[in-house]
Image (cartoon, coloured by chain):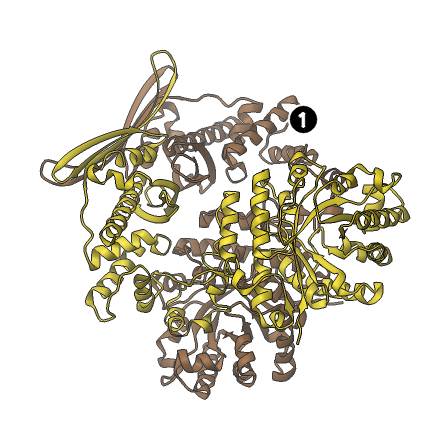
Chain colours: A yellow, B brown
Amino acid sequence: MTKERLYLFDTTLRDGQQTPGVDFALEEKRQIAAWLDDFGIDYVEGGYPGANPTDTAFFSNKATKSATFTAFGMTKRAGVSASNDPGLAGTLASKADAVCLVAKSWDYHVRVALGCTLDENLENIRQSVEAIVESGREALIDCEHFFDGYKANKDYALDCAKTAFDAGARWVVLCDTNGGTQPIDVCAIVEHVIGEAGIPGERLGIHAHDDTGQAVANSLAAVNAGVRQIQGTLNGIGERCGNANLTSIIPTLLLKESFAARFETGITQEKLKGLTRLSRMFDDLLNRMPDPQAPYVGASAFATKAGIHASALLKEPETYEHVAPESVGNARRVMVSDQGGKANFIEGLARRGISVRKDDPRLDTLIALVKEREAEGYAYEDADASFEMLARRHLGAVPAYFNVTSYRCVVERRINAVGEKIDLAEAVVKVEIDGEEKMSVAEGKGPVNALDVALRKDLGKYQTLIEDIELVDYKVRILNGGTEAVTRVMIETRDGQGRHWTTIGVSDNVIDASFEAMMDSIVYCLFERLKAQKAA
Amino acid sequence: MTKERLYLFDTTLRDGQQTPGVDFALEEKRQIAAWLDDFGIDYVEGGYPGANPTDTAFFSNKATKSATFTAFGMTKRAGVSASNDPGLAGTLASKADAVCLVAKSWDYHVRVALGCTLDENLENIRQSVEAIVESGREALIDCEHFFDGYKANKDYALDCAKTAFDAGARWVVLCDTNGGTQPIDVCAIVEHVIGEAGIPGERLGIHAHDDTGQAVANSLAAVNAGVRQIQGTLNGIGERCGNANLTSIIPTLLLKESFAARFETGITQEKLKGLTRLSRMFDDLLNRMPDPQAPYVGASAFATKAGIHASALLKEPETYEHVAPESVGNARRVMVSDQGGKANFIEGLARRGISVRKDDPRLDTLIALVKEREAEGYAYEDADASFEMLARRHLGAVPAYFNVTSYRCVVERRINAVGEKIDLAEAVVKVEIDGEEKMSVAEGKGPVNALDVALRKDLGKYQTLIEDIELVDYKVRILNGGTEAVTRVMIETRDGQGRHWTTIGVSDNVIDASFEAMMDSIVYCLFERLKAQKAA
């Protein structure tokens, strides 16, 4: 049986840029377009040439090899011809392969926002599509507010879609602009468009927003009802609650039998294995933390904490996973935690290259130790390097590379003799390495920063091994409330090769807790690097 | 027309606790249960009594007033009677009103994970339900892997559900445990369960997971197909990609006509206005940043960036919003000159007893000041006392009751002469009151605690006014990552009459940020009490 083709339309660079805080630079647009192109996306909508200098520059060259490079614009205004409309001119002057124009299809908005007659709007749609087709490009029409418009004035909404189709638009895209439409209504309305307006599904697209948390479901409901193009963004960025998340939709289309048996896309199973990486690279470019709970690609998407599931999961992982994590380039994570069992533990250790027999008595004492420390406030599931150091110390031997004999932090605020406010944070650390004592002092923005700098200032013969590491994230949580309660500090460290690791410290004193996590991070780094040197 | 009742079942405290990094303390469980109860949730599932000390303690008292307080457990094992099963005994010894037991309904899992026969599993379900009903409690059965089980062995999955129903379970809950089922299949299978197994929809529940980003859609599809109970969690926390997000589902049920016209829940429109606050308080308790894109409750959920929509939106906001932001306690954010913002601001001040005229120029400078400080990292929405002090200082006059001329904190760790490890945290504070200088010193468990004690040790004539206050919660968040980033500290203070207030401090130094929040808290207390004295 031949499968029907589904087309994926990415609008990360256009609608995605409506996300508060997101504003792509030219180079970033080029990078993202290249990623999307390589991944197998059919249409890359890059922005609105003519509307701002970045987008105009971006469209001065074609930014994709295989994907249809698509410019966004608006249908021409009433009272000017298509060739004289400045907005349309920008798209036609660009190096785009296709032009996607937004057209109002809710009668109310035609009157209020455009201030023209309903017939003038239809005429604008027709002439705009014709101008694009005449320029030798593919024309797409985004019917803005289509579903709300359909509910308000069904005939007019259908007229807009039909006008675009009759004028030669390759795709008529039904937009749930406000994002409030329910899947059951999307399905019914798409079926009416195909049945009543007579536009075949192979010419219809869906553009959904996540305002009720159902943009993915609305997109897939539209596919089930007949549309063959899906618009969305990477990681679901976009205005308000975001656009339909292509990072969630794509694996569902390729891996879920009810879609995979009927449809094919431009993305191969092999490319799909790069999805998790693509999603993370994109978050990295946006400088934001990846959502651990993201479907398919999140760090927790295939994580199991529960002991009751974990032992069965290790026996038959596929019966506890809706798809194989490798299929999207993600990995199974069976977490060490006080809820987990022995099987979790052995698996967790094995992944870190620590092998231990199930009947080794040190395994039981290690499990007991972890439980005890987790009761005190440690959370090893999110602090893999600290867990590894704890286990290695308990099971094997981690050398005491150096010994911190004392440290002191001073934080001071005062007014000096000439009335200036003086803020000071200073730390002094004494370290003993091979019988030699070294004393370092540093100032910092706060006591933790000062201590971090002082501690890593001179570790003697180990100094060259830790020169490239830096503290990239620092999280503090107070457990049980009150300053007298326990403080949990988690530190994320990065090295020059981009490796990350996380360590933890717990104490009733925030400085002590930070110090413990810093020490674990440095010792972990030394251990890994000296092990690698030995192996080399 | 009478509406059908939909029941909301919250499992934040049980399945939500499977989220990596989430582990509720007893007090946190009590707090969350009280929030859910007050909000109008029907069932609060609190954990698994007998499985760990926290849950056992939590179930030693009823934690809800109106909501059905529900214990989680597992159906009894084969080979022991219900009364001798230790797992079941824990739930029956608890103060729960209802017990929800997970039962395997996928034949494969019965054999592999339980290792008993298919008939034994049915018998275990029957006897377990009967034991709960006999104890005078409401019985619920979570049919684990129901949808996958149905696809593998339809008859057996239906037998499991039917057995629970026939034995007297109030609710038979169909669980998409692996989270991979598509809405179209959920709908078809629910319809078959009602039609073939003959279990009426008023006795069926849905428990969905978000592994394909469709837990909300799956839950609502099940409602459309006939189920009348929805299980989910606050902010969609839960194992892997999370459970169905009740924070998204509830407003859809109450505000979307296709549901609101047919159903009613235990939540009033008035309570719904507390949804955004509930969602934020919960994130705060988890010490994590709220998702700005969260449907309905996110900071960006009703935000529009300057662009093609902004000017039209200012004319007719409601045609660009799928629901009114106020209906869920959220607010519109138009990221150009915000006309609606000023009225909100005046109202916020009025609520705190501060009246100001709309045309007072100090109002504009105050709004600008708040925006500027929020850009620096302050979050006044959750620090009402700091907001009030900022406004009163700017608009009227808050006396400088006292002046801290300097402070110093020392944190030290060293080995003393006889080899003992010495930890010290000490703070010195110099205060000027009415021209007189006072110097206080204190030790604490950490620098913040020491500073808190020293600062409140001797405030001269004001000392009696602050003797009964204590710091009850202390939260630290690092904004933008790295020790060099900005630190936000929030402090909650309580007085002898049980009044609570929250203050905030922001600095690149955690001690300075803490000090700022402590100062605001003391000044707020003095201001309120001196005002009350004057009024009396």
Residue B394 percent coordinates (x, y): 56, 24
Task: Please report the residue visible at 48 percent of the width from the left and 76 percent of the height from the top.
Answer: B136
Q: Which residue is pictured at 30% across the width and 55% down the height?
A: A387
Judge by depth and name the residue closer to the eye, B364 or A428.
A428
Image spot of residue B289 (x, y percent): 49, 46
- Callout 1 amino acid: Arg
- Front one among B32 and A489: A489
**In this view of the protein, can residue B428 be seen by the observer?**
yes
Query: Where is residue B414, by image quadrant?
Result: top left
Residue found 41% across the figure and 68% down from its top: B94
Q: Nearer the viewer, residue A236 or B32?
A: A236
Image location (x, y in percent) of residue A218? 67, 61
Disc 1, SS: loop
Residue situated in front as seen by the camera: B436 or A361: A361
> Which quarter of the rendering shows the N terminus of chain A?
bottom right
How far from the left and from the top, in percent, is residue A449? 34, 34
User: Can you say whether A258 is above or below A335 in the image?
Assistant: below
Q: Is residue B180 above or below residue B317?
A: below
- Which chain letter goes with mark 1? B
According to the picture, the residue beneath numbered tag 1 turns out to be B357
